[in-house]
Image (cartoon, grey):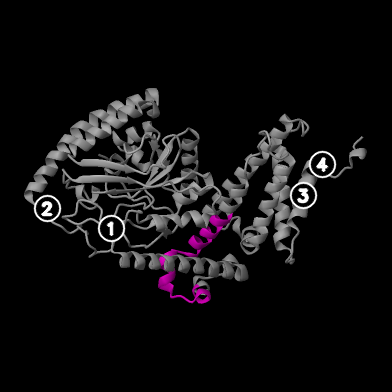
Amino acid sequence: MSPQQQDVRESVPPLGEPDAAEREGLPGDRRHERHSLVEHARSVGTWGLGLSYMIPTMLGFTAAFRALGSHKVDRATRLYIEGQLQLLFVKWRAEVHPDVDPNQQYIFCQNHINHFDHLSMYNSTPHFKQGLELQSHFKYPIYGWFMEARGTIPVPADKTARTEAIYQGIKGELEAGRSILAFPEGTRTLNGRVGAFRRGVFVTAQRLGVPIVPVAVTGMYDVMRKGSLVIRPGQEVTVHVEKPVPTAGRGPEEVTAIAPRRATPSRGTWTRTSTARRPVVADESLDGRTLRATRKRQHRRQAILEGALKVFGEKGYHGAHISDIIDEVGIARGTFYLYFESKNAIFLELLDGLLAELRRHIVGVSTAEGAPPVVAQLAGTVREVLRTMVQNRMLSTIIIREAVGLDAEVDARLRAFYAELLHYIRDAVAEGQRLSLIRELDTEVAAMCILGTIKQFVEQLVMMDVQEVDVDRMALSVLDFNLRGLLRRDAES
């Protein structure tokens, strides 16, 4: 049992229906239901048992995590979770899709119901799963010490640093061979329904190419719900671990579109009522209406993005106003705010999309048997980067002309991207030295010079008033200049 968690809200707009988990009057909404004296008495007893078990066990685990590492005592952690579930007297079971590979790293995305969510899902698969927690929660006695010692990824309160901190934290855990357990709704449901998903975890998955596993837990809303500390022991809890969704090679919009599709698990719409104890499949006509509504919202969102891009391209970021965007798209101001909270939010989403597409083309140099020559691989990367910038000329021009100094979060994202590109170039140069293709030189300085050349070339390229650009020729020329310089080989002596 954990202290009450604050809602983790990312500074990006949600996906799906904004008020899906808050709307009142839907079947299964129990937020206003009153509890009997017997239920209160059972709850007090359950809390007493749970806390007397949790506090000394968490202190012991905190010491073990610090001494041995949390991944080395994962079996003991699972026994602890079994004990907690038994003290809730729940009838627990898990249904896991056969495609879930025990040896594969995933980002498990679970619906968020109450403070016991991590207990309900963790033992359903053998993966070691690292979580995310607001950095401020690490100050809590016992619970905070436990989370910090376990290696939980801290989420900073500063929104300008949050996205990159989450990305780096998840990247480190995946590189260590561990999986991630995330709650993409960012807040607990009020009515038992799955809420709108935030983009952050899906964008991170796309950047890292790691599969997403949707997880739907039913029954926990009957155990305890947001806004109440009353525990109702003895409920049936079922964990449905769905088929993994690959993200490698997909564009950012393809991956973020997973959210609306996966908000309703494939076995049907998970609804809860005071008498139902299992998921019920929604009426087919309702499913059809829901699907059409979801598609309509996706099309509307895309229309707003395209309209904003056109306005930004014509007037620049500073000269554009929300009124210009809604006039361009032909929507009401209120409709705009259902999808984006500000002009800055929509620009950040456009920027994220472009940077994610660029990252997709920046892949490491391979020296494996049968791999193309290193120079050909480098040329391919430069070509795809240039082609992406040219294809997104309007947004690229805005970024080059106005983005630097525009906003702290924009600056942070651009700096992070350029740092990744610099790291890629530096590694490629070092690999070239290892293969005796590149002479001995300072790889850090060389990488900076190459990056500066590419940035300046791209700036001139996207601002040229030329519709047809020979990207293949230009990519080879950029690479040739950076590899061979200006002097003829017979003039070097």
Element type at mark 3: helix
Q: Residues within 10 Å of mark 2 (few under 14, many from 20)?
A: few
Of marks 1 and 4, the one in the foreground: 1
Q: Which residue is nearer to you in this view: 163 or 239?
A: 239
Residue type (three-letter) at the residue carrying disc 4: Arg
- Residue 147, x across and y down, in percent: 35, 35
> Disc 4 versus disc 3: distance between alpha carbons?
12 Å
Please tell me which of labels 3 and 1 falls first in the chain.
1
Specify the segment rendered in magenta. 326-354
**Crowding near pointer 4: few (<14 within 10 Å), some, many (20+)?**
few
Instruction: Estimate the spatial distance between the alpha carbons at disc 2 and disc 4, rounded to whole Å.
Output: 78 Å
Which circle's residue, 1 or 2, is located before the other in the chain? 2
The residue that mark 2 highlights is 35
Name the quarter where the N terminus is drawn: top left
Q: Residue at x 40, y 65 (%)?
A: 294
Provide the residue designation for mark 4: 484
SS class of the residue under badge 2?
Answer: loop
Percent coordinates x, y for residue 68 in the rendering: 39, 23
User: Between residues 66 and 199, which one lies in front from this camera angle?
Assistant: 199
Q: Is label 2 in contact with label 4 (beta carbons under 8 Å)?
A: no
Q: Which residue matches tag 1? A: 281
Say which of 456 and 300 sits in front: 300
**Residue located beneath label 3 in the image:** 476
Q: CA distance from mark 1 to mark 4?
A: 65 Å
Residue drawn at 35 percent across, 56 percent down: 264
**Which of pointers 2 and 3 lies earlier in the amino acid sequence?**
2
